[in-house]
Image: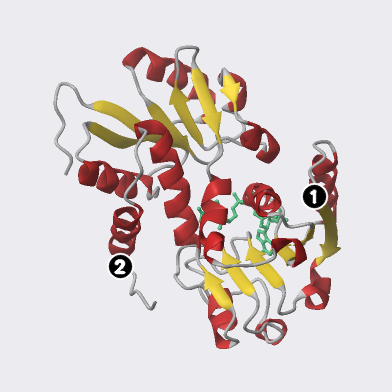
């Protein structure tokens, strides 16, 4: 455990619920490894208490904090500065203290793209397929734009929400074409040039036998494709197991979780975070058997 003294600085995560958050595990492992005088704690904050909680954080000298459901949008009006990336995503997941007040950004974008940098691709020729159009899908869109992807195909079960999703991007004029499709059309968009990203919770524990796309459609994948599941438990998901059977590249949500946390820690501490320590702490905490 980190040694808490009279000079220890406070970091944390706010959400409702919060007790299942994995962030304290990886952040405290990193802080301990770096030997820094900080501690990272979970705060269960209800929506109606958000404003009072943030004012209280300032009063007690909290240095920075992570934000999870349901506060990622509601926090925005309470900040004095919001990064351009967070404005594109429409959500903030990392806040830090400045002289002027609180500044916020969204490190899910950096977390999402970090594992993709390992693959030498012409991203402008990559066929991006995103399953789901909720909050995480927004970070995925911005990440794909940063990579240089030119065309994105989004699939979801609710057509009205898909249309709202597409319209929201028209207002911010990103250099990318966003197309929306009905779920059953996904089979027409899967090829060896696909980056296929699951942003739905389908397949998440305890429903570990489920996959957002069934085995027959996943058969269309081959070695050139990249499949990415934002879910981190189970690890791997059924979706990634199907992809691995076709020798497609697979990336799991644990890596995104670690990398978004590492990006936040770098902002708070101004040091390169020990990413391997953070990853290992989560793998141990979750009791994962490492197959790679
Ligand atoms: P969200 O805003 O609720 O969006 C979820 C999306 O999935 C919505 O489009 C939803 O459609 C769709 N969906 C839900 N159930 C479905 C089903 N049975 N069939 C088809 N579509 C379904 O949630 P989120 O914040 O984007 O999070 C989504 C997932 O990403 C979660 O599993 C979360 O844990 C994961 N995530 C991981 C990381 C990471 O660091 N690895 C970061 C962020 C999120 P409807 O609107 O029609 O319900």
- Does any portion of residue 230 appear in the rendered image? no
Q: Secondary structure at mark 1?
A: helix
In the image: residue 131, left or right of residue 34: right
Number of the label disc, if any, that sits on residue 161 = 1
Q: Quadrant of residue 99?
A: top left
80 or 176, which lies in front? 176
Give me the C-alpha separation between circle 2 and circle 1.
36 Å
- Across and down, in percent, residue 227 comes to 61, 71
Q: Secondary structure at mark 2?
A: loop
Q: Which residue is mark 2?
A: 287
Number of the label disc, if any, that sits on residue 36 = none
- Does any portion of residue 283 appear in the rendered image? yes
Marked residue nearer the N-terminal end (2 or 1): 1
- Looking at the rendering, the quadrant in which ligand 1 lies is bottom right
Mark 1 CB in 8 Å range of ligand 1? yes
Q: Residue at x 50, y 66 (%)?
A: 252
């Amino acid at each position: 455990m980190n040694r808490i003294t009279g000079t220890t600085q406070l970091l944390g995560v706010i959400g409702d619920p919060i007790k299942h958050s994995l962030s304290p595990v990886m952040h405290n492992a990193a802080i301990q490894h770096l030997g820094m005088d900080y501690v990272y704690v979970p705060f269960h904050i209800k929506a109606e208490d958000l404003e009072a909680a943030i004012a209280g954080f300032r009063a007690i000298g909290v240095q920075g904090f992570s934000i999870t459901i349901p506060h990622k949008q509601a926090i925005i009006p309470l900040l004095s500065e919001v990064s351009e990336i967070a404005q594109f995503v429409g959500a903030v997941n990392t806040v830090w203290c400045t002289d002027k007040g609180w500044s916020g950004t969204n490190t899910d974008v950096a977390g999402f793209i970090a594992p993709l940098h390992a693959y030498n691709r012409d991203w402008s020729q990559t066929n991006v397929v995103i399953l789901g159009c909720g909050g995480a899908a927004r970070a995925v869109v911005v990440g794909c734009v940063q990579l240089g992807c030119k065309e994105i195909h989004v699939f979801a079960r609710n057509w009205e929400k898909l249309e709202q999703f597409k319209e929201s991007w028209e207002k911010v004029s990103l250099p990318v074409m966003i197309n929306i499709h009905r779920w059953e059309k996904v089979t027409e968009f899967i090829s060896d040039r696909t980056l296929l990203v699951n942003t739905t919770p389908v397949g998440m524990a305890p429903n570990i036998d489920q996959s957002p796309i069934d085995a027959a459609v996943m058969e269309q994948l081959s070695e050139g494709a990249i499949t990415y599941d934002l879910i981190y438990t189970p690890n791997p998901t059924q979706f990634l197991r199907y992809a691995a059977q076709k020798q497609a590249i697979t990336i799991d949500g644990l890596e995104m979780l670690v990398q978004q946390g590492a990006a936040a820690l770098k902002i708070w501490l101004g040091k390169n975070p020990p990413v391997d320590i953070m990853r290992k702490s989560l793998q141990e905490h979750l009791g994962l058997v490492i197959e790679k």
